Image (cartoon, rainbow, N blue to C red):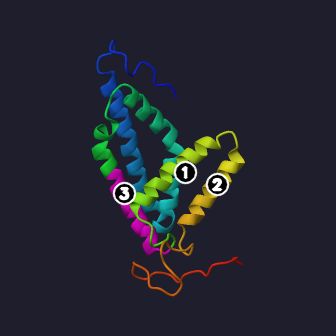
């Protein structure tokens, strides 16, 4: 995607237009997250949204990068849409955790970091689609319930209610 002329002063209001496009993209992702929750249920919605965000990231990042290059404070321009998206992500994560499909020790800041990191990883593997598919699966598997928990030793209670039992170290069947 080319976002040429974004910083061109000869086009009055171009930056505002591109800001609006970026905000609308975030709003659409948020709406899609709510739709996924309603249509697929909490057990599948988070993973479907995770994939959707990863798939939409290149276009969103192109807009954000072009705006930043033009001197726009992207974080400020998207603050309201970003806040709403984090609320939807929180709702989806909570639903997936209550359904028992996502680790209980995962919180939105870590999930957001996984999204950012996974997107960068997928960019690196762009010319290797099979490797990208496997790498995405590894990240998704790491989010699933029963894959361990941070800072918990065998037999110690977790920090969340209804924490699943720890899986012992060593090879898995």
Residue that numbered label 1 is attached to: 118
For the point 49% across and 42% down, the residue is: 57
- The reply to whether callout 1 and callout 2 are in contact (CB within 8 Å) is yes
Eyeballing the image, is 56 above or below 110? Answer: above
The main secondary structure of the magenta stretch is helix
- Residue 154: percent from left, percent from top: 54, 84
- Residue 130: percent from left, percent from top: 71, 49
Would residue 11 be seen by someone viewing this image from the given angle?
Answer: yes
Residue that numbered label 3 is attached to: 88
Residue 95 in the magenta stretch? The answer is yes
Kindly report which numbered mark, 1 or 3, lies closer to the viewer in this rendering: 1
Q: Residue furthest bottom?
A: 155
- Residue 58: percent from left, percent from top: 51, 38
For the point 48% across and 49% down, the residue is: 116
Q: Quadrant of the C terminus?
A: bottom right
Eyeballing the image, is 137 above or below 70? Answer: below
Residue 76 in the magenta stretch? The answer is no
Secondary element type, mark 3: helix
Circle number at residue 135: 2
Secondary element type, mark 2: helix
Density class for disc 1 (Cα within 10 Å; few <14, some 14-19, many ≥20) is some
Eyeballing the image, is 51 above or below 100? Answer: above
- Start-end of magenta stretch: 84-100
- Residue 12: percent from left, percent from top: 29, 17
Secondary element type, mark 1: helix
Q: CA distance from mark 1 to mark 2?
A: 8 Å
Q: How many marks?
A: 3
Sequence-wise, the earlier of marks 1 and 3 is 3
Density class for disc 3 (Cα within 10 Å; few <14, some 14-19, many ≥20) is many
Q: CA distance from mark 2 to mark 3?
A: 25 Å
For the point 37% across and 63% down, the residue is: 91
């Amino acid at each position: 995607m080319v976002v040429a002329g974004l910083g061109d002063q000869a086009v009055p209001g171009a930056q505002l237009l591109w800001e609006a496009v970026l905000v609308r993209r975030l709003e659409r992702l948020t709406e899609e997250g709510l739709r996924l929750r309603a249509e697929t249920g909490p057990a599948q919605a988070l993973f479907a949204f995770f994939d959707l965000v990863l798939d939409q990231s290149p276009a969103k990042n192109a807009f954000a990068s072009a705006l930043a290059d033009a001197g726009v404070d992207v974080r400020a321009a998207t603050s309201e849409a970003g806040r709403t998206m984090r609320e939807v992500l929180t709702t989806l994560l909570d639903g997936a955790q209550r359904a028992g499909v996502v680790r209980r020790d995962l919180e939105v800041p870590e999930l957001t970091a996984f999204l950012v990191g996974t997107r960068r990883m997928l960019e690196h593997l762009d010319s290797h689609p099979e490797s990208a598919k496997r790498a995405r699966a590894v990240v998704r598997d790491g989010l699933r319930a029963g894959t361990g928990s941070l800072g918990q030793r065998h037999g110690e209670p977790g920090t969340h209610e209804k924490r699943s039992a720890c899986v012992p170290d060593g090879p898995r069947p």
